[in-house]
Amino acid sequence: MTLYEQINEQFNFELQSGYIYLDMAAKLKEQGMEGFAHFMMKQAHEEYEHAMKLYNFLFDIDEKVEYLDIKKPNVEFKSFTEIFKEALAHEKEVTARIHALYKRATEEEDYRAVELLGWFVNEQVEEEDNFRTIVEKFERIHENWSGLYIYDHELGARG
C-alpha cells in the first residue's frame, strides 16, 4: 500500500472518528447532558475538518480519494467518565496512526506529506491533552450530580 493510500485510509478514519463522536453526542443528549453533547458535537465537526485537510491534500497532489466503509460506532454508555475515557483512547489511536504515517513520509522523503502530517502531530498533542484534562475532572467529581451539572455547563460553552 502506498503512502497516499494510507493517507486516504486516514481520511476515512477521520470521518469515522466524527461518526463516533456524533454517536457519543447522541448518547449524552439522551441522558439530558446538553453541554457534554454539545462538546462531542463540536468534536465531531473538528474531525470532519481534519478529514477535509487530508481530502484536499490528496486532490492537491493529484491523488485519488476513495471512500471506504465506515463501521457503526460501538460505544456503550457506561458512565459519563467512561464515555470520555473512550474518547481519549480513540484519540490515542489516532495519534498512533498519525505517527506511523509521519514516520513513513519521513522515510520516503515525501516532504509534502511530512509538512501536512506535522500539523496533525501537533494537533494530536492538543486533542489528547483536552480529553485527558476532561477525564481527570470527571474522575474528581466521581459522577456526583452537582459536579456533573456544573461541568456539563462548562463543556457546553465550547465555541
Image (cartoon, helix red, strand yellow):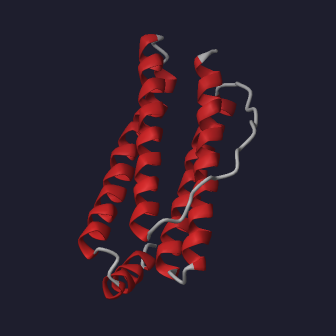
Q: Residue at x 71, y 44 (%)?
A: 70
Give coordinates of residue 123: x percent, y percent.
40, 46
Judging depth in this view, the residue of 125 and 23 nearest the camera is 23
Residue found at the far bottom of this picture: 146
In the rendered image, residue 46, in percent from the top left (x then y), is placed at 53, 56
Does 125 sit above or below residue 25? above
Give coordinates of residue 100: x percent, y percent: 45, 25
Is residue 99 found left or right of 7 in the rendered image?
left
Left or right: residue 157 versus residue 14 is left
Is 20 drawn above or below residue 153 in the view shown? above
Q: Residue at x 31, y 83 (%)?
A: 147
Name which quarter of the figure residue 51 lies in: top right
Across the whole image, how many numbered discs are drawn on residues?
0
Between residue 12 and residue 148, name the one nearer to us. 148
Q: Nearer the viewer, residue 116 or 124?
A: 124
Instruction: Kindly identify the residue that appears in the image at 41 percent across and 80 percent down.
Output: 152
Position of residue 147 in the picture relative to residue 116 (left or right)? left
Tell me which residue sits at (41%, 20%) in the image.
103
